[in-house]
Amino acid sequence: MKQFFYRRFRQIEKWCKTKLKHKALLLLYHRVKDLEIDPQLLGVAPVHFEQHLDILSRDYKPISLNELCRAIEERRVPPRAVAVTFDDGYSDNLYHAKPLLERYEVPATVFVTCGKVRKRGTFWSDELADVFLQPRPLPLRLDLTIRDKPHHWELGNSTRATEESASENRKWHILERMDPTPRHAAYRSLCRLLRDLPDSEREDVVNGIREWAGTTDAAGRDDFVLSAEDILLIEQGGLVEVGSHTMTHPVLASLPPEKQLDELRASKRVLEDILGHSVGSFAYPFGSKSDYTKETVSIVRNCGFACACSNYRDLVWRYSNLFELPRFIVESGHDR
């Protein structure tokens, strides 16, 4: 029998078949691309994404996030409804995901990290993966000071990683318990240390790592955030909507209220200046209930957003909180 999708999507689909009477499912994707390495489990191969859409369009009722929010307000969530969302705003959402969404007539919302839009930026975690998990020679030792605390990493015999060793560890991801090389241990440790830093501090650390590794430009990269032109293109046709994902993708709970307000207001303004219309949807970076607070939810409301998406597993029903909509994340790695 034809294998339509990998294990995680199949588990979600099986569970929801019996639960979706007058309830809806929000799906969270990040990237639609065949990724050589994917330590954060963000990428879904285009062939698998197409299989997902085939099932959704045949067996469920795909609706937009805006339609779902109106249904919640009217207390009439349609049975077996599914809404598709993307976080971060990678450019492959336009070039790989949108054509497939159009083919199957499945609406979607893309939440964009707006601080990267004007300068054609990349995410720090992707840059770390490029430094540590690709077969490039690196110095023996990395020394950094983060929040006034010294840290160091010894790379040992992994300083000169070969194509063969990189290929052997291609499937490694952060949910695995073991690190196959000191490079992987350094990558995991740095992701943990940098996650909660303010953007300016994190950028200083990443700049230091770039200099240490001798990687100073983005030539050949394909993991950029959508540009302003891309944002206009992705909304053409009306099937895909754009929402905010803050300016710098911080852990909002780690910021004082005034900084949270700056992140939300600025991101909304950037998108509205590009699109020429109001932007009403928002997604919390990282999105677990520990990554934002009740005060964050109030700030989202006060900024004029109509809804906000979280990242914890549950179904949406007619009494769901419009500012803490649960989603099921679709990860890569489970079909490998």
Image (cartoon, rainbow, N blue to C red):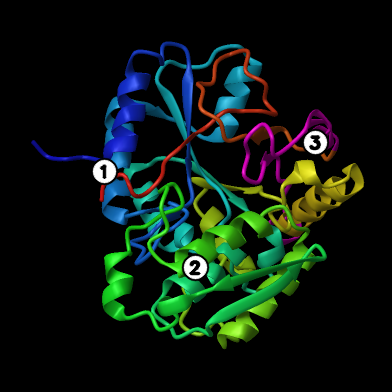
Looking at the image, is mark 3 or mark 2 earlier in the sequence? 2
Instruction: Kindly indicate the quadrant of the structure image that contains residue 159.
Output: bottom left
Q: Is residue 183 above or below residue 99?
A: below
Q: Amino acid at mark 3?
A: Thr
Mark 2, other Cα within 10 Å: few <14 / some 14–19 / many ≥20? some
**In the picture provided, is 185 more to the left or to the right than 51?**
right
Magenta residues, start to end: 273-302
Q: Which residue is mark 1?
A: 51
Q: Is residue 216 above or below residue 192?
A: below
Looking at the image, is mark 1 or mark 3 earlier in the sequence? 1
Query: Would residue 288 be counted in the magenta stretch?
Result: yes
Mark 3, other Cα within 10 Å: few <14 / some 14–19 / many ≥20? many
Could you tell me residue 196's position as x and y percent? Answer: 72, 52
Indicate which label's residue lies in the foreground, 3 or 2: 2
Q: Which residue is mark 2?
A: 129
Indicate which label's residue lies in the foreground, 2 or 1: 2
Q: Amino acid at mark 1?
A: Gln
Q: Secondary structure at mark 3?
A: helix
Query: Quick check: can you spot residue 113?
Result: no
Q: Nearer the viewer, residue 307 or 16?
A: 16
Q: Amino acid at mark 2?
A: Ala
Query: Would residue 329 be counted in the magenta stretch?
Result: no
Picture disc at residue 296: 3
Q: Secondary structure at mark 2?
A: helix
